[in-house]
Image: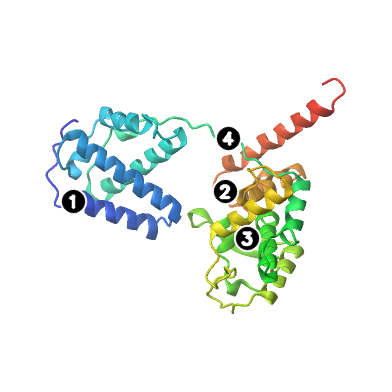
Amino acid sequence: MCKTDKKPDKTTIEVAFNKFIQHLCAERRLSDHTTKAYRRDVIMFINFITEHVGRPIGLPDLAGLSIRDFRSYLAFRRRGKTGISAASLARNLSALRAFFRYIERNWDFKNDAISLIQGPKPHKPLPRPLSIEASRQLIDASGSTLNSSPRQWVVARDQALVLLMYGAGLRISETLSLKGGDLPLGDSIAITGKGNKARMVPLLPIIGDAVSAYVQLCPYALKPDGPLFFGVRGGPLGPRNIQKTMQSLRTALGLPRTTTPHALRHSFATHLLAGGGDLRTIQELLGHASLKSTQVYTDVDATGLMKVHASAHPRA
């Protein structure tokens, strides 16, 4: 580990770390999932470096870390049975870069080595959307006797959720963020997604009808600042409930394990593209900050076309 000429700073790593986490939540407004992952990654890094140098460390020590120190840590994360994937390691490196930028900005301790570290390029698998027919089956099943819930209002709730995720391309978190004050649903709704990015999402009449049916049957009072969707005990509905419902429905229909709530969002984008939608419009509807995130659906569509060609073309 190389030395630094900086004078000792009274701010401890613990203080800097806690302020960094507050910054992620309050200023950058990252999701709870991402914040927890960043928190876990930085803690593991600090613990590794402390053991690596054999003594407690401070901010000047972080500024003096060398490329070899960072590479030792990355190698440590990849080793053994508990080694993390390339995608997780890339996220880990992003967390560390964010932490070091925060330290530099607030305490003027700069580390030049971390910017020279190249993480692994993760292989991002293509999204696995449902077919149009499977999507229809899932929507129908969510509101039928295939939905195992004995409560009629829960069945109506589940169908409204499925329609919002497939018909409007909402994430689970976005669907569950809807409030009683968002009612009545019109032909569009304002959604705040990842990175606090706001967008307007058009709503098909069938979605509004499904939500209205759920609201009429819901036994709990809807408040403007309270959740739109409730669990059976009256608390806010959690994502795990939606995941369990999807698991039950896909089992009943014989659909693959990739039939998840997020697959409905993938299906929304893929089916729009196949129907002639342009990428820029789909990007806006999904709330992607970059067009690159949306372009993956062109690969999905092309893969589907190749499969059809291979199975149907007389010369294939």
- What residue sits right under mark 4 in the picture? 125
How packed mark 3 is, by other alpha carbons closer than 10 Å (few <14, some 14-19, many 20 or more), is some
- What residue sits right under mark 3 in the picture? 200
Q: Position of residue 186 (x, y in %)?
A: 70, 69
Quadrant of the image occupied by residue 5: top left
How packed mark 4 is, by other alpha carbons closer than 10 Å (few <14, some 14-19, many 20 or more), is few
Quadrant of the image occupied by residue 233: bottom right
Question: Quick one: SS at disc 1?
Answer: loop
Asked whether the beta carbons under mark 1 and mark 3 sit within 8 Å of each other, the answer is no
Q: CA distance from mark 2 to mark 4?
A: 18 Å
Q: CA distance from mark 1 to mark 3?
A: 44 Å
| Mark toward the viewer: 2 or 4 | 4
- What residue sits right under mark 2 in the picture? 288
Question: Quick one: SS at disc 4?
Answer: loop
- What residue sits right under mark 1 in the picture? 12
| Mark toward the viewer: 1 or 3 | 1
> Mark 2 or 1 closer to N-term?
1
Question: Quick one: SS at disc 3?
Answer: strand
In the current view of this chain or complex, which residue is farthest to the top?
315
> Mark 3 or 2 closer to N-term?
3
The three-letter code of the residue at mark 4 reads Pro
Residue 295 in view in this figure:
yes
Between 166 and 155, the one nearer to me in the picture: 155
Between 54 and 304, the one nearer to me in the picture: 54
Q: Position of residue 290 (x, y in %)?
A: 55, 44
| Mark toward the viewer: 3 or 4 | 4
Asked whether the beta carbons under mark 3 and mark 4 sit within 8 Å of each other, the answer is no
Q: Quadrant of the N terminus?
A: top left
Residue 38, label in figure: none
Looking at the image, residue 243 sits to the left or right of residue 160; the answer is left
Q: CA distance from mark 2 to mark 1?
A: 37 Å
Quadrant of the image occupied by residue 209: bottom right
